[in-house]
Image (cartoon, rainbow, N blue to C red):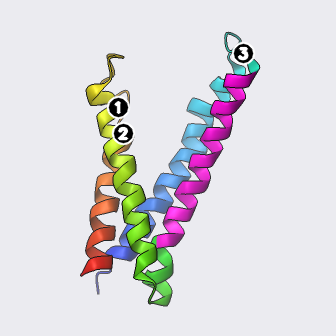
Amino acid sequence: MFDPLFVAGGLSALAALAHIFMGGTEVAAPLLEAQDLEKQPKYIAYYCWHLVSICLCLMCLLFLWPALWGGANDLAVMGSLMAAGFAIWGIGLWHFSRAGLTLSDLPQGWFFVPIASLGFWGSLF
């Protein structure tokens, strides 16, 4: 039987793995190697990168806990709200920023749309 919370948890795990492994080489490593940034903003951004890693791992757990062990749909609602917020901010950032970003520059927001949709579907219905 199809379980939307299990799929949302799996997609969240993929997001976490992509963030940690792909983002580590494409974002975190170049950030630390940047010579034109002062130490404080560089390490605050690096700290925030790790906070996102933690959030993505916890979001996976918020979906998989009720999918695998039942009950606690409020956890899935929280994961869905997180995913919806990540989607809105990610899509809005490239769409409304004045940085000249394109979808190919910042596609991450769209990845959270199916996670939020499946999470809300599985937790509310």
Q: Judge left or right: residue 44 versus residue 13.
A: right
The percent position of residue 88, horizontal first and vertical second, equals 31, 45
The quadrant the C terminus occupies is: bottom left
Magenta segment, which residues?
40-62
Cα gap from disc 2 to disc 3, whole angstroms: 26 Å
Callout 2 secondary element: helix
Q: Is residue 105 above or below residue 88?
A: above
**Local crowd size for mark 1, using a 10 Å CA cut-off: few (<14), some (14–19), many (≥20):** some
Q: Which amino acid does label 3 sit on?
A: Glu
Q: In this view, does 100 lie above or below 96?
A: above
Q: Is residue 52 above or below residue 82?
A: above
Q: Exactly how many numbered labels are in the figure?
A: 3
* Magenta part, dominant SS: helix
Residue matched to label 3: 38
Front residue of 125/112: it is: 125
The percent position of residue 34, horizontal first and vertical second, equals 67, 17
Cα gap from disc 1 to disc 3, whole angstroms: 24 Å
**Of pointers 1 and 3, the one earlier in the residue sequence:** 3
Which of the 4 image quadrants contains residue 102? top left
Residue matched to label 1: 93
Cα gap from disc 2 to disc 1, whole angstroms: 5 Å
Q: Does the magenta stretch include residue 75?
A: no
Q: Residue at x 62, y 39 (%)?
A: 48
Residue matched to label 2: 90
Front residue of 32/92: it is: 92
**Local crowd size for mark 2, using a 10 Å CA cut-off: few (<14), some (14–19), many (≥20):** some
Q: Which residue is drawn at 28% across and 81% down?
A: 2
**Of pointers 2 and 3, the one earlier in the residue sequence:** 3
Q: Are marks 2 and 1 in contact (CB under 8 Å)?
A: yes
Callout 3 secondary element: loop
Q: Judge left or right: residue 50 versus residue 70.
A: right
Q: Which amino acid does label 1 sit on?
A: Leu
